[in-house]
Amino acid sequence: MTHAARLLLLVGAATMLQGCLAKTAWDVATLPVRAAGKAVDITTTSQSEADQKRGREIRRREERLGMLQRRYDGLLDRCNGGDTRACAEARAIYAEIISLLPAVPLESD
């Protein structure tokens, strides 16, 4: 290979590498910013995600309240029939119902 051909090849390679080196330098320089943005996205909860989570929690409490109410009604019937053990259990369930009520929002009609 002649000296001129080598020189031409070297100049061509240097020209192509400049773009590659510039892109690499840009990627390295912007990496901390991109990483910080990704971390913020991961750690923050969007409003819709928060609403969905709150809705699931409310539904869970409502289901628990409904189950307790059905159980309380059955125990109350047994208590009225003279079962003192059912009365004690009904009082305990009633206390749990009362503690759950503030956490369940009222439905508007």
Image (cartoon, helix red, strand yellow):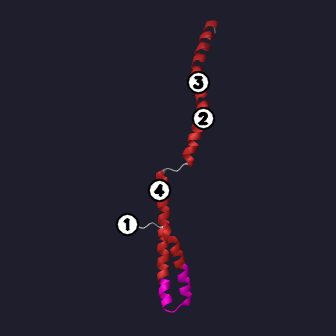
Residue 104, how many percent across, how many down? 47, 67
Give the spatial CA distance, label 3 vs label 1: 62 Å
The numbered mark, 4 or 3, whose residue comes first in the sequence reads 3
| First of labels 2, 1 by sequence position | 2
Q: Are marks 3 and 2 in contact (CB under 8 Å)?
A: no
Q: Position of residue 52 (x, y in %)?
A: 47, 57
Residue 10, position as x, y percentages in the image? 62, 14
Q: Please indicate whether residue 6 sits to the left or right of residue 47 in the image.
A: right
What residue is drawn where x is 46% and y is 52%? Answer: 48
**Secondary element at image label 3:** helix
Numbered label attached to residue 108:
1
Q: Nearer the viewer, residue 2 or 11?
A: 11
Given residues 33 and 16, the one toward you in this image is 33
Q: Which residue is mark 4?
A: 51
Q: Nearer the viewer, mark 3 or mark 2?
A: 2
Q: Secondary structure at mark 1?
A: loop
Considering only order in the chain, which callout, 2 or 3, is on the residue closer to the N terminus? 3
Vertically, is 1 above or below 96? above
Q: Residues within 10 Å of mark 1 (few under 14, many from 20)?
A: few
Residue at image position (54%, 48%) is: 44
Amino acid at dot 4: Asp
Give above or below for 1 relative to 33: above
For the N terminus, which image quadrant? top right
Q: CA distance from mark 3 to mark 2?
A: 14 Å
Q: Which residue is mark 2?
A: 31
Report crowding for label 3: few under 14, some 14 to 19, many 20 or more residues within 10 A (C-alpha).
few
Q: If you read the primary sequence from the N terminus, does the residue marked by circle 4 or circle 1 appear first?
A: 4
Which span of residues is magenta-colored?
74-92
Q: Which residue is mark 3?
A: 22
Q: Position of residue 58 (x, y in %)?
A: 48, 64
Residue at coordinates 59% horizontally, 20% vertically from top-left? 18
Identify the main secondary structure in magenta.
helix
